[in-house]
Image (cartoon, coloured by chain):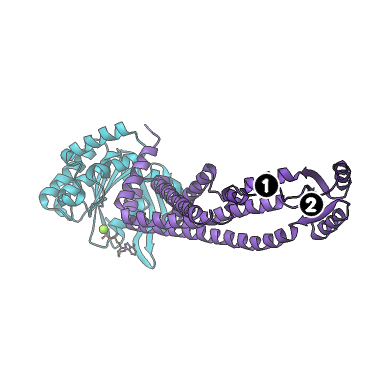
Chain colours: A purple, B cyan
């Protein structure tokens, strides 16, 4: 005659939420706000990581060639650079190619290029650096070596700037991580307290259930489900609010700024599911903690 | 003693209960027999409620042994306590219904917590509600009912799980005599089905009507 009791538990959880609407709504809203803040930090981390990655990729040396260099020298110079220590790859970029890339990057400002009929850009080599060579001194030495080659007019590399930038960003990252953790703990605490209030208002009912032979798990499960539902709703609310904020920012800010070079993005579907699942976990954990304390007494 | 040819269902052996320094139960040794109808009586504060609490482990005994259907309560782990309690149907003076649940839900809760299926629960709850004359009150809430009606719901709840033993702690103390008679009749019905009935009361009229075994308690001790 035993039966799987999930439907009974869900029914009880929903009835419970209905009869304690106010408490539940407050908890869901605070949970939603916590998730908004935590996921905002996460989104910041994800995007900053991508910016850094794309900067890291540009850890390379550009060698611009004399306008009047001889075509026949090309292979020779390329060969000499390739043989240098620390060079992992070298690509020739013709001035036509360079112009095409620039136009692509600056699509929105295409009017700038309308009146250009001669190409002002030089031919160049893009030199990729081996990972173990990415220290300032080694880069510097390599760059000087390349600059001394005949037909190389100028070298350029963005390593110094990237290093400084990375250091600042790392501080941001740690701060964001600590804040996210802090708000996550706050969310668990809020959840635990809400459930504690709920349990307190139902203490007679729980007492009676125990008298008629209900097991602790029979008493706990509806609360767990309630925690999961509240966590889920809170998570959806939090991530939706973040999405609205994100849309607002990307419409109003980033179009004018660096959007041509750096694109910021929102969570993927998978990330979003992760955030909502975490929120459900927070809801459950809050329940778990206060139930553990309550049923012991 | 009557019923001595019967099987023992509950055994108390030199049981003591102390609350802090206060002795609520002192050295009680007594047997209850299967399908017995027994009264526990005595003045207020004599230890009647405490004695019942010890049986369903609402409180642990301070000293001595309590054996129910061959199981020594001091050996039960916390997770086994719910299963001990399913041997009992418990009725209180103040009914202890859940006021936020309707009559049907109050009664069905017992079977739900035992893991019975929905069909069985519906059928069984209907049967016991009819037995206590409350079959058309399933959707009512306890506070909309009279005291006598609430106690009948509590009895339905106590009987719905087909317990071996019914413990009734002053079940008629807050009822008028008509309702008290109805409660007694329902307890007799349960008794006629083979249930062991233990009723605490200081209603002499009730005891006289039944004419069965009476255990007198005074200051925590059994009087002979
Ligand atoms: N939880 C408790 N804490 C302290 N003392 C208690 C508690 N419950 C009962 N008592 C005391 O134990 C004695 C017996 O009480 P009780 O069993 O309720 O008596 P009765 O039900 O016969 O009126 C009384 O003196 C009472 O004050
Ligand atoms: Mg009492």
Identify the residue position indicated by label 1 in the image.
Answer: A117
Seen in the image, is A73 located left or right of residue A242? right
Q: Which of A135 and B41 is in front in this view?
A: A135
Identify the residue position indicated by label 2 in the image.
Answer: A64
Pointer 1 chain: A
Which of discs 1 and 2 lies nearer the camera? The answer is: 1
Seen in the image, is A123 located left or right of residue A225? right
Res B88 quadrant in image = top left
Element on which disc 2 rests: strand
Q: Is residue A263 visible?
A: no
Res A23 quadrant in image = bottom left
Q: Which of A236 and B171 is in front in this view?
A: A236
Seen at 42% across and 44% down, the residue is B71
Position above or below: A38 against B160: below
Give residue B67's position: percent from left, percent from top.
40, 47
Q: Residues within 10 Å of mark 1 (few under 14, many from 20)?
A: few
Pointer 2 chain: A
Mark 1: is the Cβ under 8 angstroms from ligand 1? Answer: no
- Quadrant position of the N terminus of chain A in the picture: top left
Q: Residues within 10 Å of mark 2 (few under 14, many from 20)?
A: many
């Amino acid at each position: 005659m035993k039966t799987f009791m999930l439907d009974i538990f869900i029914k009880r959880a929903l009835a419970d939420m209905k009869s304690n609407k106010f408490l539940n709504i407050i908890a869901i809203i605070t949970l939603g706000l916590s998730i908004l803040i935590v996921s905002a930090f996460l989104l910041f981390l994800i995007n900053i990581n991508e910016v850094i990655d794309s900067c890291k990729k540009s850890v390379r040396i550009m060698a611009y060639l004399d306008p009047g260099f001889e075509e026949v020298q090309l292979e020779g110079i390329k060969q000499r650079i390739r043989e240098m220590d620390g060079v992992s790859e070298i690509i020739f970029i013709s001035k036509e190619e360079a112009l095409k890339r620039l136009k692509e990057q600056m699509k929105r400002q295409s009017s700038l290029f309308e009146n250009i009929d001669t190409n002002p850009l030089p031919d160049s080599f893009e030199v990729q650096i081996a990972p173990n060579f990415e220290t300032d001194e080694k880069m510097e030495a390599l760059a000087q070596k390349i600059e001394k080659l005949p037909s190389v007019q100028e070298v350029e590399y963005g390593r110094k700037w990237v290093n400084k930038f990375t250091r600042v960003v790392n501080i941001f990252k740690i701060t964001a991580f600590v804040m996210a953790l802090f708000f996550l703990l706050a969310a668990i605490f809020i959840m635990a307290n809400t459930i504690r209030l709920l349990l307190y208002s139902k203490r007679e009912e729980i007492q009676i259930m125990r008298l008629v032979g209900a097991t602790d798990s029979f008493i706990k499960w509806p609360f767990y489900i309630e925690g999961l539902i509240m966590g889920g709703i809170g998570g959806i609310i939090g991530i939706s609010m973040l999405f609205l904020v994100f849309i607002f920012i990307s419409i109003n800010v980033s179009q004018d700024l660096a959007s041509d070079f750096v694109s910021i993005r929102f969570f993927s579907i998978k990330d979003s599911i992760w955030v909502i699942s975490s929120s459900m976990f927070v809801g459950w954990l809050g329940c778990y903690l206060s139930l553990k304390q309550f049923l012991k007494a | 003693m009557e019923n001595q040819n019967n099987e023992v269902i509950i055994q108390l052996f030199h049981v003591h209960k102390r609350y802090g320094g206060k002795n609520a139960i002192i050295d009680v040794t007594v047997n209850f027999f299967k399908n017995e109808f027994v009264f526990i009586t005595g003045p207020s504060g004599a230890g009647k409620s405490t004695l019942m609490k010890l049986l369903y482990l609402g409180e642990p005994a301070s000293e001595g042994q309590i054996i129910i259907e061959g199981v020594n309560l001091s050996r039960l782990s916390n997770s086994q306590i719910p299963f001990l309690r399913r041997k009992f149907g418990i009725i209180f003076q103040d009914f202890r219904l859940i006021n936020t649940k309707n009559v049907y839900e109050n009664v069905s809760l017992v079977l739900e917590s035992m893991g019975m299926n929905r069909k069985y629960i519906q059928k069984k709850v209907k049967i016991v509600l009819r037995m206590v004359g409350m079959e058309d009150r399933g959707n009512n809430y306890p506070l909309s009912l009279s005291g006598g009606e609430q106690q009948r719901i509590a009895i339905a709840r106590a009987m719905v799980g087909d317990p071996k033993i019914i413990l009734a702690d002053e079940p008629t103390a807050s009822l008028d005599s008509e309702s008290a008679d109805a409660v007694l009749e329902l307890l007799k019905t349960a008794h006629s089905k083979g249930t062991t009935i233990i009723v605490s009361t200081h209603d002499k009229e009730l005891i006289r009507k039944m004419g069965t075994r009476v255990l007198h308690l005074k200051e925590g001790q059994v009087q002979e």
